[in-house]
Amino acid sequence: MAKRKEIMTLFDVGFWTSRLVLNNLAFVIFLGFLATVYIANAHLAERNVREIQMLQKDLKEMRWYYMSLQSENMYNAMRSEVAKRVREDGLRPQEEAPKRIVVK
């Protein structure tokens, strides 16, 4: 029975404890507000970290895509490739030099 009484005294809010809390109620509310702000800040930071990681992954993919398009463009812009493509349309490279027109 003595152990039970000791445990109950731990959970018993005495007169001095309740008076202390009521006298410092503004400070207790302020501490609760600070705790809420701290938790919200942690959640926002985690969300920003996840978003940054996702954007870095997207950026890496876009860089690879850009490099593949750039190499493909460089290959297609080579003179031999251009000649192959226009040959399909019936165009051939000019074999004689262009004639110069002189205006007097």
Image (cartoon, helix red, strand yellow):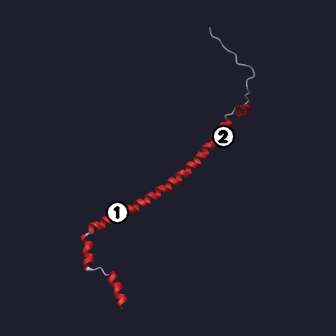
Task: Report the side of 102 relative to 93 (left or right).
Answer: left
Task: Report the side of 9 relative to 41 (left or right).
Answer: left
Residue 30 lies in what quarter of the image? bottom left
Residue located 25% across and 79% down the image? 15
Q: In terms of depth relative to the viewer, which is nearer, 28 or 2?
A: 2
Q: Which residue is mark 1?
A: 34
Residue 18, position as x, y percentages in the image: 27, 76
Q: Which residue is mark 2?
A: 72
Q: Can you name the residue that lies furthest to the bottom here? A: 1
User: Is disc 1 in contact with disc 2, using a CB cutoff of under 8 Å?
Assistant: no
Identify which amino acid the numbered label 1 is placed on: Leu
Residue located 27% across and 76% down the image? 17
Say few, some or many: other residues with alpha carbon within 10 Å of mark 2 (under 14 / 14 to 19 / 20 or more): few
Say few, some or many: other residues with alpha carbon within 10 Å of mark 1 (under 14 / 14 to 19 / 20 or more): few
Q: Is residue 39 above or below residue 57?
A: below
Identify which amino acid the numbered label 2 is placed on: Glu
Please, what secondary structure does the residue beneath circle 2 have?
Answer: helix
| Mark 1 to mark 2 CA distance (whole Å) | 57 Å
Residue 97, position as x, y percentages in the image: 72, 19
Q: Can you name the residue that lies furthest to the top here? A: 104
Between disc 1 and disc 2, whose residue precedes?
Answer: 1
Residue located 37% across and 63% down the image? 36
Please, what secondary structure does the residue beneath circle 1 have?
Answer: helix
Residue 77, position as x, y percentages in the image: 67, 34
